[in-house]
Amino acid sequence: MSYKLTRRDILKRAAIAGAANAVTLRTKIWAAESAPIQESPETLTTSEVIILGAIVARLIPTDENGPGATEAQAVHYIDLALGGALASSRQSYAAGLVAVNAYARSSEGQPFTDLEPDAQDGILRDMENDVATGFTPNSSSFFNLVRSHTIQGMFCDPAYGGNADFVGWQLIGYPGVRTAVTADQQRMDVAPTARQISAFDFPAFASSREWRSRGR
């Protein structure tokens, strides 16, 4: 891909920043991108999920480096977050996803989801470079919004609906949450043993379980 921020840049940034900001929890797991929907979306519409799934699949694609946003179920994360901590962005998604399809039709003659990957990349590149039309306030704002949330869904604690099966953490070599680190574990010449469990599985966070189970 030829975006200003490449997949490698995304992974470097994620490795430095650590897991993304967490948002509201649901426990249902469903794959929205290029796979049958197992559960109905909670915030987005089904048509919005399909378009968004195609977008995130190109932002962090599945390739020879490993799994991408599809396997991480980034759309599931975004859907849940738009009903909670990211609710202020809900209308931006409603308008932006319509604009993506409209621009794809006007420039390529087909909806975004029907385009070949290279053509989809071209649409996203136009959005990033702010030359795509029909967006409010502009296409780059929506591109950056979706990219940011996709990165969050790729690398968040799985309790928040993304990073399914810890694929994001495995991709960047993140060994998992630690509540304490020994001197031996701080040695830079030895890779730490992966402990891929949710932060909420630690006893110190047990009191949060009831809150999480109640949802929004």
Image: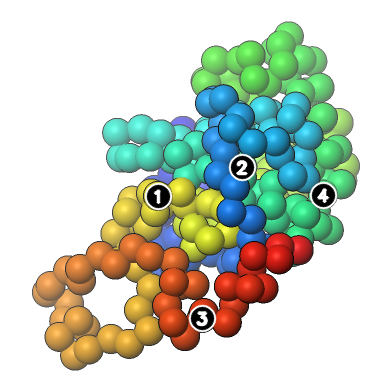
Which one is in front in this view, the residue at disc 3 or the one at disc 2? 3
SS state under label 4? helix
- Between 155 and 199, the residue placed more toward the observer is 199
Three-letter residue code for mark 1: Asp
Residue 203, placed above or below residue 13: below
**Left or right: 47 as drawn, with respect to 68:** right
Residue 31, placed above or below residue 181: above
| Residue 58 visible, this angle | yes
**Left or right: 55 as drawn, with respect to 193:** right
Extreme residue toward the bottom, this view: 183
Which residue is found at the position 47% from the left and 85% from the top? Answer: 204
Which one is in front in this view, the residue at disc 4 or the one at disc 1? 1
State the residue position of label 3: 205
Three-letter residue code for mark 3: Phe
Q: Position of residue 22 (x, y in %)?
A: 60, 66
State the residue position of label 1: 165
Tell me which numbered mark, 2 or 4, is placed earlier along the sequence. Answer: 2
**Left or right: 190 as drawn, with respect to 177:** left
Q: CA distance from mark 3 to mark 1?
A: 20 Å
State the residue position of label 4: 90
| Residue 2 visible, this angle | no
Residue 26, placed above or below residue 73: below
Q: Position of residue 147 (x, y in %)?
A: 61, 48
Crowding at dot 4, Cα within 10 Å, few <14 / some 14-19 / many 20+, comes out as some
Q: CA distance from mark 3 to mark 2?
A: 26 Å
Which residue is found at the position 20% from the left and 68% from the top? Answer: 193
Q: CA distance from mark 4 to mark 1?
A: 27 Å
